[in-house]
Image (tube, rainbow, N blue to C red):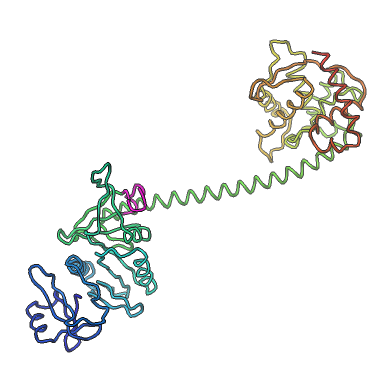
Amino acid sequence: MFVAVDNAGRKVNPLDNNLDELRLMSNSKQLLCPECLTGVRFAAGPRVTAHFKHIHLLDCTYDSEPETAEHLKGKMLIRNWLLEQFPEAQVEFEYKIKETNQRADVIAILPDGKRMAFEMQCSKIPGSVWKERHALYKSAGIQDFWILGESVHRYGKSEGIKDASKHQLVSLASAIYEEKNALFFLDTDFKSFRALYQHKMSYWHSDTIIVVHEEGFSLNEAKVYKQFIGTDRIRNEFKSWYTRKLEVEQEEKREEERERREREISEKKKAEAIKLREKLTSEYIRSLNYDSLESVTKMMTSTEKEYFERLLKKHGFSDDNFPGVFNVFTDYNYLFRTPSHLWQLWIYDKYIYRKSPTFQKIWVPKIKDEMYRLREVGVFHFNYTYGDDHFSFAIYDYLRKLSSLGIVEKLGYTTKYQQVIVNKLPPLTGPDVHRDVAFHLSFENDALLIQSARKKEIEESFLFYRELVEKSY
């Protein structure tokens, strides 16, 4: 122990009292243990750090653990350093904390009542024991600083050679670093700190090795800040690092929030798209039996209607012979506001009809770009709720359906290139067959076709029309 009391109950210690006076008091048995109030003796010498020890071995917890010279010297250095740091504070050795029955190596009680406990830890206690002691300090509202003896520190090795960037951590040091993001080692001979900080860390190498750039500074340079011990330079570096860290964390949170909102919007759009597809599917099936070209044009803008009627006249199409291949329902029809009759007929007229062998390849991005251009003059309209580019999904799906009739064929592994196989559709009069072809192309692998009462007739119409297409090769 480093503190004793005299017969009057006054505290004495080797720093504030004359050593000869303490020896005299010890010899005259005037020194007592502050805990059990039994006699203690004073010891000091060239090879012995001044301290007090029970005269008789008693069941007293005060000095139940023998203190090393490093521990005793460390406490003295810390106490003197704190007196310089906080001249207005009450600084005491081995202060007993009534709330937790702990005894701090050194405590600093500031004028505002704030208490800071400083522990000079030289024995390698388990990390679990440290966590219990730290929790007790926290429960008492005391900020605790743990300073390890230089004897606890060891460098790691790389290829068998000491590596100054690697630091071995015993269980105690690991527990402190994980909680406080800093470690302090005090060299009592050179009166200097070796410090490891989170903002200097590279990474954990293993459970017991940390790779971090160490900071070294003298005890005279050291200052106590809110959370750690360091210098003004280190504090400024930490503040810059911490500011950047907070900015990154805040940006990550903002990004997570953006992604969350985007997911919500995406899920909402998907749900809306499913409902819209179900509605359009129902409307499409009803329209197959009752709609005429005149009724279709009523759903168009004046510009769309004018363009559509021009194409009908060019190809000689009417209600009796309008091909079902231009009334195909895809999973992405909802991305178009323009009726499928127009945009599907336009694809045929622009990229398939009477194309010579030299120009019999279709590149889908070109179709999309041309549709964008025609959008500017009001020929096509898209559903902007789901994004401009997404309407190309309907184009890809439509060309895939045309390939089942042998009109086009995918080139290679990509669907962006299509080869035109038939550049003119065979003439066929009879709206019933065209309705069946449209229904088959729309729902070829769908339960709507499989469960249809007219499944057989629809398939026969489709096969009949496909034979006419094949004869046009």
Residue 196 figure quarter: bottom left
Image: magenta residue range: 197-211
Left or right of residue 186, residue 238 in this image: right
Left or right of residue 28, residue 117 in this image: right
Return the residue nearer the eye: 208 or 393.
208
Whole-percent x, y for residue 253 in the image: 50, 51
Left or right of residue 109, residue 188 in this image: left
Return the residue nearer the eye: 114 or 441.
441
Whole-percent x, y for residue 287 in the image: 87, 35
State yes or no: residue 209 in magenta.
yes
State yes or no: residue 328 in magenta.
no
Q: Quadrant of the image for the C terminus?
A: top right
Q: Is residue 92 above or below residue 218?
A: below
Residue found 34% across the figure and 61% down from its top: 176
Residue found 88% across the figure and 29% down from its top: 458
Return the residue nearer the eye: 81 or 369.
81
Residue 337 figure quarter: top right
Residue 129 figure quarter: bottom left
**Residue 399 seen:** yes
Q: Residue furthest bottom?
A: 8
Whole-percent x, y for residue 290 in the image: 91, 34
Q: Is residue 390 above or below residue 238?
A: above
Return the residue nearer the eye: 280 or 58.
58
Q: Quadrant of the image for the N terminus?
A: bottom left
**Residue 301 seen:** no
Whole-percent x, y for residue 108 in the image: 26, 72
Image mark count? 0
